[in-house]
Amino acid sequence: MEKNALIIIDLQNDFCPKGALPVPHGDEIISYINEIMPSFHKVVATQDWHPENHISFAETHKKNIGEEIEINGIKQILWPKHCIQGSYGAELHKDLNKNGIDLILRKGTSQNIDSYSAFLENDKKTETGLHYWLKGLEIQKIYLCGLALDYCVYYSAYDAVKFGFEVYVILSATKGVDVPKGNINKVLSHMKSLGVKIIEKL
Ligand code: VGL
Ligand code: ZN
């Protein structure tokens, strides 16, 4: 039988309502995620985990939130400070069932490069190592959920396809920010064109 894994992207306080970079209704997917966890051979949770003066923070550059800059040829949207290493905002949401998680992977830990994807940093070269772990366990199908659909979930799906996994995105277990407006529909069509299977529920 083919082995599958659930990858829960960035279900952290800062991406939930009242957080520093809130995804609308981000916390409403948690109970469903807890419910489906037992259906997978392995469950991975990622944590966006940035140093204080991370390159992705508007404050680091004394620029405005939402501006886009280019550093070493890599486009970077500037975000409010979020998911600072060791902070409350960086913790996984308290309602997420931690006992069901096999691996917690931290990303975006280097000062000078962001990492939306759970697989590759934003230079599209530096590996997090997650694909080795999954391949080492002979996992072929991966199911993505979590926050935010049009950023970290999307980039993770993109790379997962490139690494040769069969990739699913579970819509009722993810929420997006839709920034800029229309972004969610744009990434959904792009993922479909890449062969990602967009499903409503498990
Ligand atoms: C994310 C923006 C900045 C995400 C992380 O988890 O989608 N978005 N850092
Ligand atoms: Zn981030």
Image: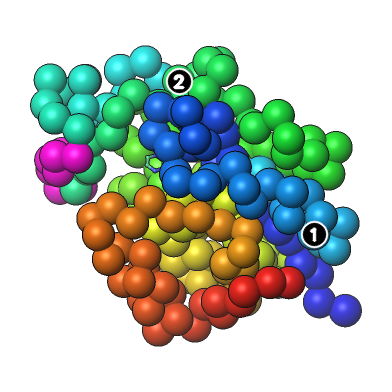
The residue under the point 52% across, 47% down is 25
Q: Callout 2, which amino acid?
A: Ile
Does the beta carbon of the residue at mark 2 sit less than 8 Å from ligand 2?
Answer: no
Q: Quadrant of residue 72?
A: top left
* Residue 188 to residue 134: above or below: below
Bounds of the magenta span?
Answer: 66-74
Which residue is tagged 1? Answer: 36
Ligand 1 found in image quarter: top left
Q: Are marks 1 and 2 in contact (CB under 8 Å)?
A: no
Ligand 1 closer than 8 Å to label 1 CB: no
Residue 192 locus on image (x, y percent): 45, 81
Q: Which mark is residue 84?
A: 2
Amino acid on which the number 1 mark rests in the picture: Ile
Quarter of the image containing the N terminus? bottom right
Spatial CA distance of label 1 from label 2 is 29 Å
Q: Quadrant of the C terminus?
A: bottom right
Please tell me whether residue 11 belongs to the stretch shown in magenta.
Answer: no
